[in-house]
Amino acid sequence: MTRRVPRVLTAAVLTAALASTAGAAQAAPVRGASPTPAGGTSSSAAAICSSPSAPATAKRLGNAIAAALRGRSGTESVAVYDVERKLWCGVLAGRRFDSASVVKATILGALLRKVLDEKRPMTASEKSLAKKMITRSDNDAASKLWTHVGRTRMQRFLGQAGMTQTTLGSGGYWGLTQITARDEIVLLRKYTERNGLLTDKARSYALGLMHEVISSQRWGTPAGTPSGITWHVKNGWLPRHGSAWRVHSIGAFTGRGHSYTIAVLTRDTPSMAYGVSTIERVARAVHGNLNPGLRSLTTQGAQNVPWEQSDGSVPPNV
């Protein structure tokens, strides 16, 4: 029997949060800058999405995201950024969550920066571990790379990337790293946009791995990806304290002259399947509104998912 958790985003809370964060929470990030965290949100589209060049699209997408989240149990955090439109959407985008396996995308970035700093190619071992960690979400590989990169270099990478809201998990508990949807968008933009932290070759390598995840892990943000758009994804799913799940998905989407990123983090959902469903409701809303008129692929979404099995990023007794 699953437990329904009271919804956090009540109308009263939303109104108060919007009043206290008006302006800053709606600012669209520009190239080279970090997205502004949404400290609160509102059911109104204007409070969720904004774009200086495509206000109508922002309003339509804000309405769609609000509809996707309406009535869902647990707590959800959403961040979306569209490069061409400079469109930013945020729903509790500055709220922290246990990372689960989503942090593996950050470990990969820190590894790539380490290799660049040392002015050398990746070793065969690094390539093997990175591929297992991203495409299969292999935990042993993640632990080895977490140690290989080192805490000092991991922290340095966070600072270099501008991921100021992320706190590394203590010791070897990388799955308890505290992340925000805002910072996950910052990371994904380092993979999708030219920057001084990662070379084009490094970015292409990372996105390639995120496009090669095994079929059972292609759920979440890729759901509803339109034809002609290429998805890149990393997911995390972790039960904590009984049946309260953390289910997350971050994705980058490129093609047809578009580049946009989506991060959806959830916690205290009554089951893994419920969390996946919430994420995919949001993803379909984003893809559909950013790509009007394009046919959605039917091959993405929740298929052959190992339901209700932890990703193992945190030991069950922790």
Image: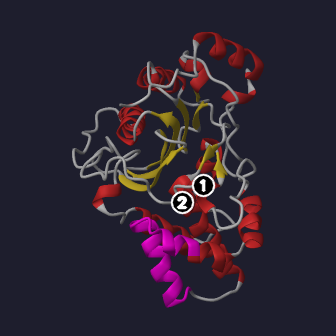
Identified by mark 1, the residue type is: Val
Nearest the viewer among 48 and 29 is: 48
Residue at figure coordinates x 68%, y 58% from the top left: 169
Quadrant assignment, res 278: top left
Furthest-top residue in this view: 12
* Residue 288 point in image, percent of width and height: 35, 33
| Left or right of 76 in this view: 13 | right
Res. 315 mark = 2
* Residue 13 point in image, percent of width and height: 65, 15
* Residue 87 point in image, percent of width and height: 56, 35
Identified by mark 2, the residue type is: Pro
Residue at figure coordinates x 35%, y 40% from the top left: 273
* Residue 149 point in image, percent of width and height: 67, 76
Quadrant assignment, res 28: top right
Residue at figure coordinates x 51%, y 38% from the top left: 266
Give the secondary structure at mark 1: loop
Residue at figure coordinates x 58%, y 15% from the top left: 10
Image position of 95 with respect to 160: above or below: above
Instruction: Report the span colored magenta.
Output: 122-143
Give the secondary structure at mark 2: loop
Image position of 109 with respect to 96: above or below: below
The residue beneath circle 1 is 318
**Contact (Cβ within 8 Å) of mark 1 with mark 2:** yes
Q: CA distance from mark 1 to mark 2?
A: 6 Å
Nearest the viewer among 67 and 10 is: 10
Image position of 283 with respect to 155: above or below: above
- Queried whether the magenta region covers residue 139, the answer comes back as yes
- Disc 2 crowd, CA 10 A, few/some/many (<14, 14-19, 20+): few
Quadrant assignment, res 18: top right
